[in-house]
Amino acid sequence: MAASDGSRRVELSSNDCVTDCCGGVFVTIQRRGDRVVWTDWKNTDDIRVPLPADVHFDAAQYVAELARAAVDVSWEEPVDSIARLLTLELAEADCFECWDCDVVSIRPQRAGSARVEVYFSHRGDSQSVGNSFVHDLPVAGDEPAGEVVRRFVELVSGSDPRETARRP
């Protein structure tokens, strides 16, 4: 969460549900000279939980830690790596666009058999259930994440993804 001279409100929590339903933890981040300050904490899930006071960081150390954290993916499970790499790859590739489709979301699923769900729809029609599709990418712990992503991009590039997808 980069800091700039202007304040920016960010959500720190990540729910399995949407924030409007299950709430979240928010903070305002701002750079003030050689300091980064986290202020105005808010917990919309449980107002009984005490919130921290303002937190101050050395700006140079803060920027260095963000850069380090951005490249450290050692904590990821294979399902997380595939979802992250697929998000990056599909943002660069035009494989869905050639079929007049847009990717709506990419969701790692841990329950049951691990898989990554790729939700997509006809371009400009993501709100219509009848025009929505899902591709399931099974995750095997022994297959490199990059290989799973490459194979999926090749599949979508070579044939209409709607033909092999399921409806949500």
Image (cartoon, rainbow, N blue to C red):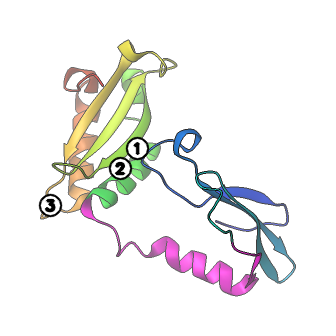
Dot 1 crowding, Cα within 10 Å, few <14, some 14–19, many 20+: some
Boundaries of the magenta span: 52-78
In the image: residue 27, left or right of residue 117: right
What type is the residue that disc 1 sits on? Leu
Q: Nearer the viewer, residue 27 or 91?
A: 27
**Which quadrant would residue 66 be assigned to in this image?**
bottom right
What element does badge 1 sit on? helix
9 w.r.t. 53: above or below: above
Reading the image, the residue beneath label 3 is 143
User: Which of the marked residues, 2 or 3, is nearer the chain's N terminus?
Assistant: 2
Residue 148's disc number = none
Q: Quadrant of the N terminus?
A: bottom right
Is disc 2 in contact with disc 1, using a CB cutoff of under 8 Å?
yes
Q: Residue at x 30, y 25 (%)?
A: 168
Q: Nearer the viewer, residue 42 or 10?
A: 42
Q: Residue at x 24, y 43 (%)?
A: 152
User: Which of the marked residues, 3 or 1, is nearer the chain's N terminus?
Assistant: 1
What element does badge 3 sit on? loop
Reading the image, the residue beneath label 2 is 86
Reading the image, the residue beneath label 1 is 90
Q: Nearer the viewer, residue 28 or 71?
A: 28
Dot 3 crowding, Cα within 10 Å, few <14, some 14–19, many 20+: few
Is 159 colored magenta in this rendering? no
Dot 2 crowding, Cα within 10 Å, few <14, some 14–19, many 20+: many
